[in-house]
Amino acid sequence: MNIGAAKKTQASQNDFWSVDSQPEKLSGPVALWRAPAVLATFMVLCSLGLYALHHSSFLNYFFPTGDWVFVRVRDQHFVAIRQFLLSYFVAFGLFSNGSARARARLILAMVGYFLAFCLILDLSANAIYQVTGLLPALNVQQIAAGVVGFAIFSTQVFGRGAMPETVAMTVTPRRRLVVAARFVIITVLAAFISMKVNQSNPAIVSWLRHWALLGGLGPGVFLFLPSLFLMLFILSLWDRIWSEKDDRYCPPLSVVVPAHNEEYILAHTIASLDAAAERYGGDVTLLVVNNNSSDNTFAVAQKALEQAAHLTGRVLEEARAGKAHALNLGFSQVETEFVIRIDADTQIEADALWRAMSHFANPEVGCVGGVPRTRGRSFFERARQAEVLVNHGYYSIATDSLEALVAVPGMFAAYRTALTHELGGFSFGLNGEDSEMSMRIGEMGYHVMVDPRVHYESEVPATMHHMREQRMRWFRSSFHIAARCADASHLHRASIRGSIILPLMLFNAAVRGMTICLIFFGFVEYMDLFARDLRPQLHAIFSVAIGAPFLVSVMAICINRAWYALLYVPEYTLFRLLRSYFTLESMLSIKITERVRKEKRPVTLPALPQLGHK
């Protein structure tokens, strides 16, 4: 039976729920009704609020714009973003994961901080008007309120949620001055380009807006990030042209594969490693760690190793449940200078080993990842293929130009062994142990990168249940990594990765979790149930679901020359909505505490026992 057939017939058997799915101290189960309850409560609150703002003579006198704007202004706006955010804060807080007191404090904090900011913003705008006679545009105030509202939500959930302990980090980023100069120059250029496009409003921009490919807030707002990342991507390619060589570097290599109930696929994973070892040109040792399996994983691994012709290895037993425990046992037995971790359901291409290892000829490289592929046999696989081309084949490479790549997925990640030992191995009891490792290696001053020529196929969930489990775990990891690596987020550290990318990860999670509610809210206003004046246009509503991300996905696919994946873009667009729903569920799973989490002195992890490392 070939790999594809094995996965097609048996993938559904791996609808698992392990200790890694939901760290007990940091998260709790989310009943299927809770996210719909948030959406329904949000719709009730936003409808009542809009009705009151437009039909109460008392409120209409003080808030004539139809939103909670504290200073009377003359112009109108399309979306009552303040009413949206206040409704969402209350709806989310009511069904968040915590005691009644903790949930009440979360709601009061989000609402209080947001209203205070809006009051200061509006009074400042009025003061400018009184002094200069120029009244700032209301849409600018609304955009500012929206951005700050998203930030307040993410920071309050982060600050009041149960999070991992911060770990003491060595923060000495590479090329600080070069990176800082690049960031400032490219950010200014992106802002300038967006502003010029917004002012000129050429025919192509009007066409894109008509088809909901740019946002209703103006193309300048939606074009800023795409233009920023495009320039960063080009700069990263320039760096690689001048620094990379095609010379092979094939030192002795170890591969660690943690395996929990993987009998259905593990033999194919080992066979793909054997084929890659044949082409590698150096010695390859495979360490399979059977992690508390209840099936025949151990026997299957032993038999596959006996049949391997181009690598040697053995099977280790780790009784403690958890991937981090399995990884640490395997890494402690590594005797080579370099090691690659591969998930048990991942089949690598034949040239993946030597392509990844060629980068380590440069002593500044500390961690290397690749770009996954799928076979496109199902909706999830096709959407996933477009997703990885955008995230790993485009954004990861773009952020590399700023030495700011955070996550190298554990599906395939190559390391200098000594660095993993120095950092104390992989952390248990949190989501994102792979991202934490690559993040910390990068902050030590080593180059962390993704090579788009390194390909591998990793299992895509075959059922909605498995997809939900995976995405809740993945999306929760951004909060866990931000907490774990908070030592790098202080501004005096001068780390783009820590002080800019980590906060952006939390901000993006907040926006993604609110996406479905934002679409619902746009339709409520568009249906003219409450408003008496201007309404949002349809393209402004649909751009939330489609918008600039559609253009970015097409561009990323073309850049990676994966032309077949253009057919997957519509499914990827729908998948992004499902992904938003899972993000909401993931944030609902975070345990909310009654007190704000105070920053503690970072803990220092002991070095990983180096039983066999030379």
Image (cartoon, rainbow, N blue to C red):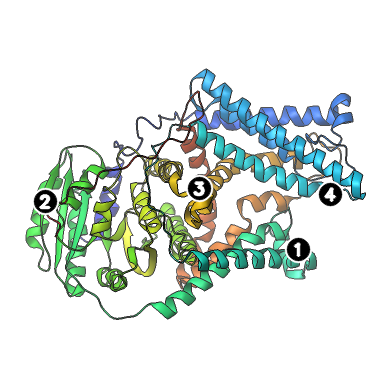
Write down the quadrant of residue 53 in the picture.
Answer: top right
Q: Which residue is mark 4?
A: 136
Percent across and percent down for residue 137 are 83, 49
Residue 198: mark: 1
**Residue found at the very far top of the displayed protein:** 100
Work out how far the residue at label 4 is from the one at label 2, CA to CA, in angstroms: 68 Å
Relative vertical location of residue 494 with respect to residue 503 in this rendering, above or below: below
The first of marks 1 and 2 along the sequence is: 1
Secondary element type, mark 2: strand
In this rendering, the label closer to the viewer, 2 or 3? 3
Residue on which the image places disc 3:
490
The residue under label 2 is 315
- Type of residue at label 4? Pro
Q: Kindly state the secondary structure of the residue where label 3 is placed.
A: loop
- Mark number, residue 99: none
Percent x, y of residue 318: 16, 42
